[in-house]
Image: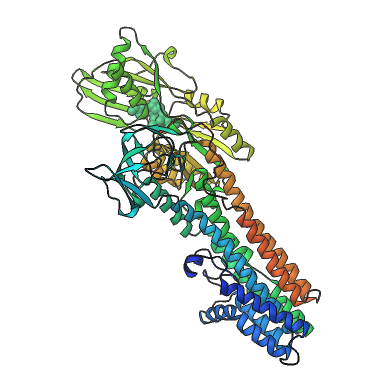
Amino acid sequence: MPTEEERCCHLIAPDQGPDREGGEHVLTWQELSRILFVALCALGVWLHFSQPWLAPGVLGVIGLLVGGWPIYKEAGENLLARRMTMELSMVIAIAAAAAIGQFLTALVITLFVLVAEVLEGMTVYRGRRALVDLLEFLPRSAFVIQQGHGGTQEVPITTLRTGDVLLVYPGAKIPVDGTVLGGQSAVDQSRITGESLSIEKTPGALVYAGSINQLGALEIRVDQVGRDTSYGKIVEVVEQAERSRAPVQGLADRMAGYLVYFALSAAILTYLFTRDLQSTIAVIIVAGACGIAAGTPLAILGGIAQAARLGAIIKGGTPLETLGHVDTVAIDKTGTVTIGQPSIERILPMAGATAEKVLLAAATAEWHSEHPLGQAIVAHARALGLVPAESTAFHYLPGLGIQVTVEEGDILVGNLTLMRSHGIVPPPEMIITAAATSEVFVARSGNLLGAVVIVDTIRPEARQAMDTLRSLGIRTTLLSGDSAAVADAVGHQLRIDTVQANLLPEDKLAVITKMVAQGQVVAMVGDGVNDAPALTKASVGIAMGSGTDVARESASIVLLGNDLARFVDTVVLARRVRRTIWQNFAGTILVDAAGILLAALGFIDPLMAAFIHVSSEMLFILNSARLLPFGVGQRTAGLPGNARGDIPSVQGKAV
Ligand SMILES: Nc1ncnc2c1ncn2[C@@H]1O[C@H](COP(=O)(O)OP(=O)(O)OP(=O)(O)O)[C@@H](O)[C@H]1O
Ligand SMILES: [Zn+2]
């Protein structure tokens, strides 16, 4: 039976290629001279120019033995490993042609196979380059400032240690993650955070390996080097992704194996019915499978590399494949369709309370909160110089709010659901329903003090992103922990198909689980702790760059930066990958079936068969190669829309 390792005839498999070839695959002089030699032999056999000294048969045999050596070797190894490959079937065909005295045919087939092998090798090599380029983007050396006399010394970056101080010249790439000690400059960190605008760096600012220092010289203290940098982690994830196999790759390998069996069986039948060796050989030769076996991993490789350029780190072939047939996108509200940096718009005190009292009570409860709403409240209170009371018991109620105990009693801060569950009923005129507005109620000792109205900004590109998703035929649904009124308003503004609000983290999980169980292919986009469980259960989980570590770890795709347009670009890319793979599948089967039929009926001679085999699969491989990114540093997305420039999107081991 065909095995997973099974590969097509003249293929240098992308996951073994350059390693097996010693790192580089460009045309070597051995390959070139072998091809020229076979071509000369073929010419000699054809024109009989060796005639008086050497019989064409002898020349043919020499040409086949010397020229076809790599093919025989490969076929022999496959035979020993009991693997049925196209190399084997090609060798059978070459031997059969030679056996009936058709040396020209045998030589030309050999020539085709050798040339195709080189061409494929170069294409696949380019695919690997696309990834290697990512790594080699970092400079190899750095200028270390020497203690004492202040001069610099150029050293390889592998020798750098945490704490070293570097000088980065204008226009140079920053080699490490570090802290600016001196100087001032604009830095382009689009490769790491996805932000397209340069960021101003002054002493104290953090800089990231792989970003480009633009205007001034910077003195930088080394914090992280090599693989520990944000950039190193991105590269690591992409490399791992490349090694992991998508299900479609397994399918491709099995298909390629079956095609060999099919061609050989068809050849046997042809011989039994026609007794025509010529047609039989043509049948064996005509069926190619590299378009599937090599085209599939190449397309996935290209997709992953291209996505990394776009600003989406895809953690494997599987999420890329799944994203290509997503039919539903579930999207979180706060931090995902909104920027997630809310600010206090106004405070609505109840009769008898003051705005200051409401804010102070809220800030007391939220003092240690990590929730964006809580942080907005604390920041506002701080700005007004309010000092909160000491609190004792502290209860965070995910998706609801917060409860703390102070001297005068309990403070309860949170949404309507939380208030109602404590028997507190805010008057209707206090309930706000505007789009990017959240309302937090504040109660003390069971009495409502008032409400804090907090506004966030909807991401500028969100509307366009949702429109594009709809035009792709994808359903959108907003999953929010916020109140129905607010979530509905956002959903309406962005024309999102359905809105579900008041969801606790476990509700988000349940909603996603149910959709997946119903057979929908769901992409969940989120950023928060409350999204993490749902991200893991979705068909494919996507985390925003500014998201929490848990979210980025739970997701199988991480956006660099926070641009929803990048997400949509990645969906489009994933669809292209999928379409390309299926084009190759369908095309290969079509060409092989038609070719086998025509060859069996005697319409195609072995030479024509070899030509059809090689040219058709080259076409399919080139079809996949279209997905490879061209040139280093090319970016197709990069529109403004990332408001935050300060967030390294890959921290910790999150990606
Ligand atoms: N620390 C907190 N302080 C005040 N209210 C809170 C707090 N935590 C949660 N809430 C209330 O619970 C609601 C749900 O919170 P949750 O964190 O689940 O979602 P969210 O951040 O509002 O929105 P989304 O789910 O769209 O990201 C919030 O809208 C808020 O009303
Ligand atoms: Zn082939």
Q: Is residue 494 left or right of residue 350?
A: right
Number of on-image labels: 0
In the image, residue 357 above or below residue 338: above
Q: How is the image coloured?
A: rainbow
Residue 459 visible in the current orientation: yes
Q: Which residue is rendered at x = 56% and y = 36% of the image?
A: 476
242 is higher (above) or lower (below) than 262: above
Against 491, residue 165 (above or below) is below
Residue 196 at x, y = what percent? 49, 36
Horizontal side, residue 633 vs residue 357: left or right: right
Q: Quadrant of the N terminus?
A: bottom right
Foreground residue among 410 and 213: 213
Camera-side residue of 3 and 16? 16
Horizontal side, residue 221 vs residue 345: left or right: left
Residue at 31% x, 43% y is 166
- What is the quadrant of residue 596 in the picture? bottom right
Picture coordinates of residue 7, whole percent (x, y): 56, 70
Give x and y (percent) for residue 205: 33, 34
The answer to whether residue 400 of the structure is visible from this angle is: no
Ligand 2 sits in quadrant: bottom right
Front residue of 206/449: it is: 206
Q: Residue at x 69, y 90 (%)?
A: 58
Q: Residue furthest top?
A: 352
Residue 243, image x and y in percent?
46, 60
Q: Is 123 situated above or below 337?
A: below
591 or 166: which is nearer to us? 166
